[in-house]
Image (spheres, rainbow, N blue to C red):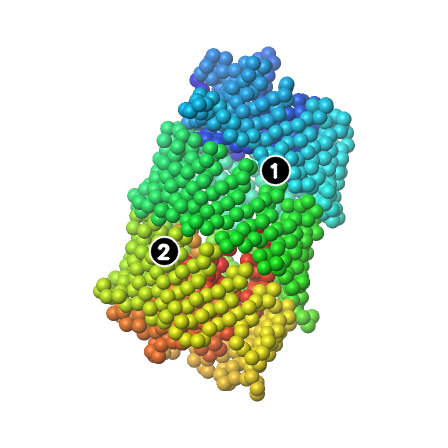
Amino acid sequence: MFDPQKVLACHASGPLTQVHRFATSIDTIERTAPHNGPVSMVTGEVSLALTDGTLDGILPFVFTRLYRTRAVELDSGLGFGWRHSLSQHLEFHGEQVLWIDAENHRTPFPWPTTARPMIRNKLSRAAIYLGEEPGELILAQAGDAARFFHFRDGRLTVISDAYDNRLTVQRDGLERIQRLDNGADRALQLRYDLKHLVAVDYQVFQRCGPEAHTWRTEQTLASYRYDARQRLVEATNAVGESERYDYDEQHVILQRQLAGGASFFWAWERSGKTARCVHHWASFAQMEARYTWDDQGTVTVNNADGSQEVYVHDPYARWVRQIGLDGGEQHKAYDNLGRLIFEQDALGAVTQYHYDEAGRLIALHAPDEAPTSYKYRHGFLHARTRGRATWSYQRNAQGDITAVTDPDGQITHYGYDSLGRLLTIRFPDQSIHRFAWNALGQLLKETLPDGSQRMFSYDALGRRITGQDEHGAITRYEWDAVGRLSRTTLPTGVCRAWRYNAYGRITAETDELGRVTRYEYADDLHLISRRINPDGSALKYRYDHAQLLLTEIENEVGDTYRLDYTPGGLIRQETAFDGRRTTYSYDLNGQLLKKTEFGDDGSQLVTGYQRGSAGRLRVKTLPDGVRVEYHYDTLGRLVSVDDGRDPPLQFEYDLQDRLITEHQGWGILRYDYDVCGRLKCLRLPDACILVYHHAKGGALTAIDLNGTPLTRHRFVGGREQQRQQGLLLSEYAYDEHGRLQAHDISQKQRPQYRREYAYSAKGNLLKVTDSRHGSRRYQYDALDRLTGVRHARDQCAEHFTHDPAGNLLIHGRPGPCVFQGNRLQRSDDSWYDYDAFGNLIRERRGLPPQVTEYAYDSQHRLIGVSPPDGKSVSYRYDAFGRRIHKTVDGYTTQYFWQDDRLIAESGPRHYRSYIYERSEPGEPGSFRPLALLDGKGRAHACPYYFQLDHLGTPQELTGHGGAIVWSAQYTAHGKLRESSRERFEQPLRFQGQYFDAESGLHYNRHRYYHPDFGRFLTPDPLRSGGGLNPYRYTRNPMGWVDPLGSGDPLGLIPSGSIQAPDVLTVASK
């Protein structure tokens, strides 16, 4: 009797098939160590695996074409050498059954009998069973998503899974596969011209109407054309994009031309099925490789740039040695059953693997770490132990996890229906996340633990066409025939649209205002060569590296950014737009060893890195000779960082690797977590205690300070609706996109003040209506850069333009702005000087000039300011580069941090703590301030509350009774225009910024921001990763924030649809 559980228990990470490397049957494609895509480093064959369509459903099926030169003598209905994912059959040779799978991989089995109904081929990780039907045999390959292939008379009849979901194979009178039916009114139809497949159609079964009880073709997914010798020469997708193939006389592939125009070529030694590739090149110059083979399992690859790789396999086609492009040599070893037992990296670090008698991994010994052990039950992983922590798993008969117990004994449960669809997740706090599906396995409704719901709908081809969020807002999606998103209609009715080339790359993107950004691609490549912005300005990109890596960016004013790489693709040198040059060197594992920065004057700053055998950073030697040492525990967790100047930073963790104690010089932070892993308690450096309360599902409901209420919160669908701060109640309203639309503040039901926000179709802030300060209107250019702000209550309008490189020009000032390589040289009556590394070192303002000078350490951190009034200002930083001391005329303020957020400061006459809003699980910590505690210790800490705008910028600070103790108005770029005359001062500005009164600058974690000019004093430490303009704050300070002072990537990365990383986030309430 066929039992799916038994084959599921067959270990998935067993050995490779032990077949001699010169045999005609080799291992699966993913195990043949391909080079440059299709060339196997074991046999020299070429393998192409191409997806032509998908049948959706509970048991989805991907229709894939596969070409192998090792099968060129075979024609399975797609031409010589080609097969598809249904091309499977059994052959019978006496008492032996031979399974020929879709990859032409041949696995032998003895014939199963009633006495021996299940037989495993351990080397191939496969099994054969007697089926329930007469004459039925079932074959399976072990894996995470096991599939069972049912055969009768050697022919494939059914594909099933552990839940007995089935795909039925239907055949025509000639025994050709005619249809693959998923049992839910969807199917793939295969059409033929005599014996050859000419098309694959996606079909829907009609249950009613004039075509009731018939299959209707919704779309032809792929069509195929053959030459006179019955060789596949062209494959065309649903939108008519075709790729073409050419062969020699024995059907060995010579050329593949992609639908986008690029071609790949192969030259061979030997012929037919024994052919071995010796030369692989393309229609573009960057890619070319030559292969030299011996008869001992070694191949040497010589690339077009002169680099070389060596691959060595043992007689059983197992990878045993490799010399990489950058010279690193790696080794692997196997036991006599073919199981991997030993890996050695290029620096000699060893990872070892141990197995039980069934071939299951039971222990992993990684370098410089305690071992991880594994236990099994009924063939499935039951427990994983690392150090003193154990995670255990319960499973159903089909192998799906039904419960996970963490090291603290908390259990998360998973529930499934009889078809294997996930129905519920019950978390340790007993909250439940529910899912509802249709017969095709498409998610229709999702009920979140807080009771809110999301709903989805799909078209006949299974593509999502609507999504309704927790608040009822509906987004609609349109797709082209090959499943590329062509149009999105947002809840407000505005649209975004995209057009594509044959590579599926975006060629035009139309925004919500109808403005078009275009992308061009040169040399028939899939890589952007030019981006044309809506205002007509353009960026150019080049890819001259052998691996088609980006080597040059030309910005809108013709300046270039150049990148040079090692043969292995690591950045070796980058030259910035202003000519600054930085070089990098690496160890044989590709880990950074040295960074050298070259100044304009020829000076050098060298940073060195020393690593342990596991690759972890052990010592960083700074250009000034300071050594920063890093220490780890036996589980590889960072426990100490010591720069030799200040007390070491120290860290402690719980069993689940969560931080529980953090030591920073004069203070300690302590953390405690609830049963779901959310922060429950935070003990501040002055012993004040914050307790966080959450509803089921994770929504924050309250924060207590030292046992008394600090704030109360009400969230609906992930959005905060109300917040109680002392006697003040804030109520928030949002638009369809989740942007803050209104903020009302009341005291005991008496309105105090209100702010309203209005946005353009593109999402730019257009107007703020403020009951305290009047209204403000905003204008933007075609690139969404802020160009104007008009204030209703005064005539102090602000006007801006931007040069083509994105440098901000502020109008209304008497003189011009002059830039060179994005460095501001002159503005009005002020002149600016820079050091050899692009750091601003001197400002000269007015006549006679008022001079401010800036001094930096070897890491480009500001360490001193000499203002015109003669004050003495100095700064110090910890080993992570966080500012921990500020001394002004002998008075020192010390700072304490929680990750990258300032959480406390202590000075001669003050002590303050800063509390921030909680972020969503899995998101970076919020930089939006919630409360300020004035005074040290439980007896003296007095809370004040921040009232923020849509960006998270403080507008007011209020006391418990609601009185405003501080308020401010800002320029568009964050400079204080006007503040209240209260004596209370608070320094927080844009998210992540701290105002320094002694300099007028804003400390922004990694850099200092100059609000007068909307720029940083120093170039972005991320270099090429930080954006086209290394000094710019953001493109639009009314919609974006940069809380870390390290990155505005918009416009740099050559992509059709740029997404902002976590450190640069769109600001919304």
Pick whichever, 903 or 649, lies toward us. Answer: 903
Left or right position of 576 against 766: right
Q: Secondary structure at mark 1?
A: strand
Q: Secondary structure at mark 2?
A: strand
The image position of residue 56, as x and y in percent, is: 48, 32
The C terminus lies in quadrant = bottom left
The image position of residue 777, as x and y in percent, is: 43, 66
Quadrant in the picture for residue 81? top right
The N terminus lies in quadrant = top left
The reply to whether residue 16 is visible in this rendering is no
The reply to whether residue 546 is visible in this rendering is yes
Residue linked to disc 2:
734
Q: Residue at x 33, y 78 (%)?
A: 982
Q: Residue furthest left?
A: 748
Q: Amino acid at mark 2?
A: Tyr
Query: In the rendered picture of this protein, how many numbered marks are placed on residues?
Result: 2
Q: Residue furthest front?
A: 210
The image position of residue 78, as x and y in percent, is: 64, 25
The crowd level at tag 2 (other Cα within 10 Å; few <14, some 14-19, many 20+) is some
Pick whichever, 66 or 622, lies toward us. Answer: 66
The crowd level at tag 1 (other Cα within 10 Å; few <14, some 14-19, many 20+) is some
Q: Amino acid at mark 1?
A: Ala
Q: Evaluate if marks 1 and 2 touch, with contact meaning CB atoms under 8 Å apart.
A: no
Residue linked to disc 1:
333
Say if 759 sits above or below 957 in the image: above
Q: Residue at x 51, y 71 (%)?
A: 799
The residue mark sitting in front, 1 or 2, is 2
Q: Which mark is residue 69?
A: none
